Amino acid sequence: MPPPINSILRQPPPPLPLMSSLTTRHVAVIGAGAAGLVAARELRREGHHVVVFERAEQVGGTWVYTPERESDPLGVDPKRRVVHSSLYDSLRTNLPRECMGVRDYPFERREGKERDPRRFPGHREVLMYLQDFAAHFGIGEVVRLQTEVVFAGLGEEGKWRVRSRPSNHNRMRSDDDDGDCVDEIYDALVVCNGHYVQPRIADNIPGITAWPGKQIHSHNYRTPEPFQDQVVVLIGGAASAVDISRDIATVAKEVHIADRSLNENAIGKLPGHDNMWLHSMIDNVHEDGRVVFHDGDAVGADIIVHCTGYKYDFPFLEANGEVNVDDNRVGPLYKHVFPPALAPWLSFVGLPWKVVPFPMFELQTKWIAGALSNRLPLPSKEEMTQDTEAFYSSLEASGTPKRYTHNMANYQWDYDNWIADQCGIPGVEEWRVEMYKFASKNKRLRPESYRDEWDDNELVLEAQRDFNKYLN
């Protein structure tokens, strides 16, 4: 384990604080998903001038559902038309809404024909929350929709040159046409482009090139109908794999889940399901369609679904070699945010996973905004480098692969509270921590019904009392 890390608001947004003694920066934010929207709010609260670049037609990032799929089901063709949504139609949150919202803009139920009042709502409700957030804080006025950043690199005097152009959703990523490009100069760059776009594929499966079946990554999964009466092998054991396997099982002949981290005692038929089995990882596949697992079982399969995660990808970024992606470690980064050599002028929001994301975005961006205005001092480059190297060494000593560098399952609250301390603000509310723990436990106990059955109503009431501080 890494070392410990010592209609809701009806009134107008609060006025920007007086910043006469602080420094105002011109800041480019890449992406108008949840991270970018929260970043824009915190940067503006600190008094900075902000432009948010968003290549899609609306704000919301990964929460903007689109039924379209990519021409390459696996998403590995570099010339493919990139679809930025990885949502499937049936997706509901796996966290209760009380946990998800930012501190002073709670994710409360709202009335309306299109609203979803459930405690674990569908993806459309999350998008509407983000749209409400953007409207309430006037963020739309600084967002440039349908504007793609094709280059962001260091220029003279440490400034950032940002080149953008109108989005063309039929444009291939290999298209280097500079027509209609605009160059601008910014003091700082905040990267909020998300990490659910570039699929990671289960590799090194012997025989896969000759295997005759179809393959698809969960990035391109939308509805179960294409899997009607098929024998499906699904690779993965995380949240999307759990949801998608059950979704597919409603129409498929058989669903076989291959999970490299599965406890051997769990292998076999999935209790409560007539057509679902758990297996160890795939060992090899054959030209006759067979898929053989490490546990010795074999099935004749029609489709392999890769629920194997995503790659961090920053195709626009040129940071003079100071930031690289190595086996899905973005680094070197001090506390997953600042590259020591370029802090605070370059920062990343939202890289950690297995977290409650929106509150973490809020804390990270408060820290970034304060560092840029010189209100919150950062350690020296040498101190940040030493801390980062010590963190990476601790991962190596514990046998943690690089690809798990940003996995915070075991210490997200320490991390959040550490950043809150740097910002001089209260840490994460205790009810939020306990609610998250309860939801995780309830999911294990009631995997089929945890979104609709729970026993933590006292925590809900405590959250509501906290929310009342922000209601008027």
Image: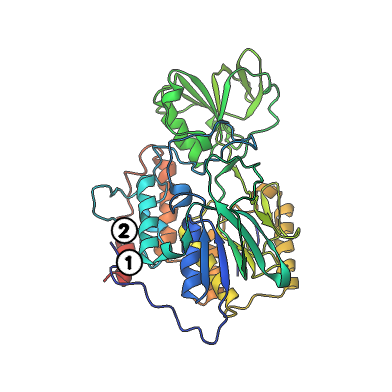
Taking 445 as reference, is 70 left or right?
right
Residue at x 37%, y 75% (from the top left corner): 14
- Check the image and report above or below for 155 versus 114: below
Taking 410 as reference, is 331 left or right?
right
Res 368 → quadrant: bottom right
Q: CA distance from mark 1 to mark 2?
A: 9 Å
Does the rendering let one see residue 1? no
Name the residue nearer the viewer: 9 or 428.
Answer: 9
- The secondary element bearing badge 2 is classed as loop
Looking at the picture, how far across and down is residue 351, in whole percent? 58, 55
- Check the image and report above or below for 351 versus 39: above
- The secondary element bearing badge 1 is classed as helix
Which numbered disc covers residue 108? 2
Does the rendering let one see residue 431? yes
Q: Are marks 1 and 2 in contact (CB under 8 Å)?
A: yes
The residue beneath circle 1 is 467
